[in-house]
Image (cartoon, grey):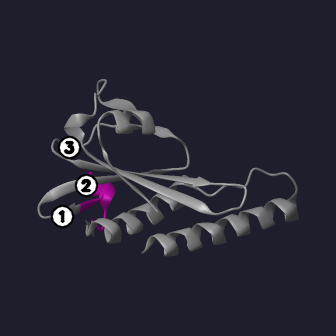
Amino acid sequence: MTANQLKTEIKSLLKHVNGLKLKYGNRPFTVDGHLLGTLGEVFAAQQFGLTLNENSVKEGFDATKEGKKYQIKTTQQTGLSIKKPFKDTILIFIFIKVGKDNIPKITTYEIAENKIPWKNDKTYVGVQLLEQRNATKQEF
């Protein structure tokens, strides 16, 4: 999945969600985080040349490349709380922002797990932290 394909899929989902809101009143229809997360995994696999696991829940990580483990996190927020992954896992964060024009902006950050200051087994990882830790950033 290319960046343009991901943007097209998100715009299509948003159009459908907005249609539901109009049709059924002011109900809180949203693009489900799991659905967005799965789209992010497919996008990351193509962009970073990863092989997705068939069952990331069972394996404990989302993808591999050259023997390395990858965890992929996608959000529409400016950060998220995550559990500490396996040692030596590479983390890919995908931040999706949708403006009033309904055009998604996609920003990815790639960083090694050992560059994150973990608080016990869970911590909040936001854009500011990723930039402070010199995560590799790409914008689409």
From what the image shows, is residue 58 above or below residue 47? Answer: above
Secondary structure at numbered mark 3: loop
Mark 1 to mark 2: distance in Å?
Answer: 8 Å
Residue for badge 1? 65
CB atoms of marks 1 and 2 within 8 Å? yes
Of 47 and 82, the residue lying toward us: 47
Q: Would you place residue 113 above or below residue 136 in this image? A: above
Residue at image location 20% in from the left, 47% down from the top: 89
Label 3: which residue? 86
Q: Position of residue 86 (x, y in %)?
A: 20, 43
Q: Please name the residue shown 55% across and 49% down the image.
A: 76
Left or right: residue 65 versus residue 39 is left
Q: Does the magenta portion include 62? A: yes
36 vs 91: above or below = below
Query: As shown in the figure, which amino acid type bears the numbered disc 1?
Result: Lys
Q: Is residue 7 above or below residue 95?
A: below
Residue 1 in the image: x percent, y percent? 42, 75
Magenta residue span: 53-63
Given contact means CB atoms under 8 Å apart, are the residues at marks 3 and 2 in contact? no
> Mark 3 to mark 2: distance in Å?
9 Å
For disc 2, the neighbor class at 10 Å (few under 14, some 14 to 19, many from 20) is: many
Quadrant housing residue 111: top left
Q: Say whether disc 3 or disc 2 marks the residue closer to the N-terminus.
A: 2
Comes first in the chain, label 3 or label 1:
1
Mark 3 vs mark 2, foreground winner is 2
Residue type, numbered disc 2: Tyr
- Residue at 18% in and 64% down: 65
Amino acid carrying label 3: it is Phe
Residue annotated with mark 2: 70
Q: CA–CA distance between discs 3 and 1?
A: 15 Å
Q: Is residue 68 one of those drawn in magenta?
A: no
